[in-house]
Image (cartoon, rainbow, N blue to C red):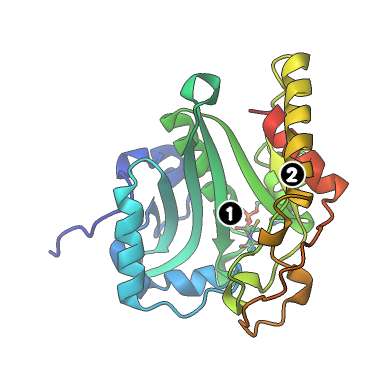
Amino acid sequence: MSPQPPTLFSPSLISTDIQGQLPLGYKLRPLEITDYTKGFYDCLAGLTVVGKVSEQSFQQTFEQMRRCEGVYHIVVIEDLAASRIVATGTLIVEQKFLRGCAKAGHIEDIVVHDSQRGKKFGIRLIDQLKHIGTMVGCYKLLLTCSESNEAFYGKSGFVRKDLHMAVYLNNDSTTTASVAAPVVVVPVVAPTTSSEATTSTAAILGAATTMTTNNSNSIVNNNNNNNNNIPHTDTTPKVRTVSIEALSASMESIMVK
Ligand SMILES: CC(C)(COP(=O)(O)OP(=O)(O)OC[C@H]1O[C@@H](n2cnc3c(N)ncnc32)[C@H](O)[C@@H]1OP(=O)(O)O)[C@@H](O)C(=O)NCCC(=O)NCCS
């Protein structure tokens, strides 16, 4: 029997209850270093552009993540008979100084292979990531999704909390394609006090003002996304409009801390 391949995080964080809810022949487990050969990328391709990644790059990235103990939790569901990954999802645990050095979890890259949808694998992935978040002490989980997936996450207790904002750097077709208009969906967490909310609001308004004036040269112009990788040589200061939705998302992210 071949030895167990390295896992990204401890299998002790996998819930036996959630495993028990899967159909026979499917296994819920941490990502393993050999999953490149089990169709991990075929599965991810159902979400967005994956780019060309060699097995060596995959393994290096895996080891890099594994060294960040307690941070990256990529779970997969494997079809054991076919030796194929049919679903995957990620929980990244962010250590904060706030709230007595609390932890917040970020859910990313949820995808079920298109041949396997409608079998509750998506819900099981989210349940499993919530389980890990609970076990490692996260006080909240956050995620971004398209409007069309809002009802799916709603089934797991997530609710819409304003919007988020993004700036794309070092743009090329692997990092900018298929960018849907996202919304932020988080469990409801109210600010502790009204003064905390007011202070946070002032802070983000100050940050936004700085961004649109003093720091504007560093902002990438996404409206000119022609993917030709020509360096941007125009040094004229640019003022970028911060939408009210983006601003309110930033305010919210501070208010829920
Ligand atoms: C979204 C996705 C993960 C759902 O996975 P799935 O395994 O097919 O979903 P499940 O079988 O677990 O569905 C659970 C429930 O959610 C519902 N549901 C699934 N997708 C839904 C959607 N997009 N909108 C509303 N409800 C949805 C199902 O009908 C089911 O409802 P029920 O419990 O009342 O029967 C899957 O469709 C997918 O991989 N999509 C492409 C990638 C993607 O968009 N990922 C999310 C990135 S934010």
Real-space Cα separation, disc 1 to disc 2, in angstroms: 40 Å
- What's the amino acid at mark 1? Gly
Q: Is residue 24 left or right of residue 242?
A: left
Q: Which mark is residue 233?
A: none
Residue 18 pos. (x, y %): 46, 42
- Furthest toward the right, the residue is 244
- What's the amino acid at mark 2? Thr
- The residue indicated by pointer 2 is 210
Residue 25 pos. (x, y %): 39, 60
Query: Ligand 1 near label 2 (Cβ, under 8 Å)?
Result: no
Choose between 227 and 206: the one closer to the eye.
206
- The residue indicated by pointer 1 is 122
Residue 174 pos. (x, y %): 58, 75
- Furthest toward the bottom, the residue is 228
Q: Residue at x 41, y 48 (%)?
A: 72
* Labelled pair 1, 2 in contact (Cβ < 8 Å): no
- Number of other residues with Cα within 10 Å of mark 2, as a class: few under 14, some 14 to 19, many 20 or more: few
Q: Residue at x 53, y 73 (%)?
A: 50
Q: Is residue 54 left or right of residue 170?
A: left
Q: Is residue 64 left or right of residue 240?
A: left
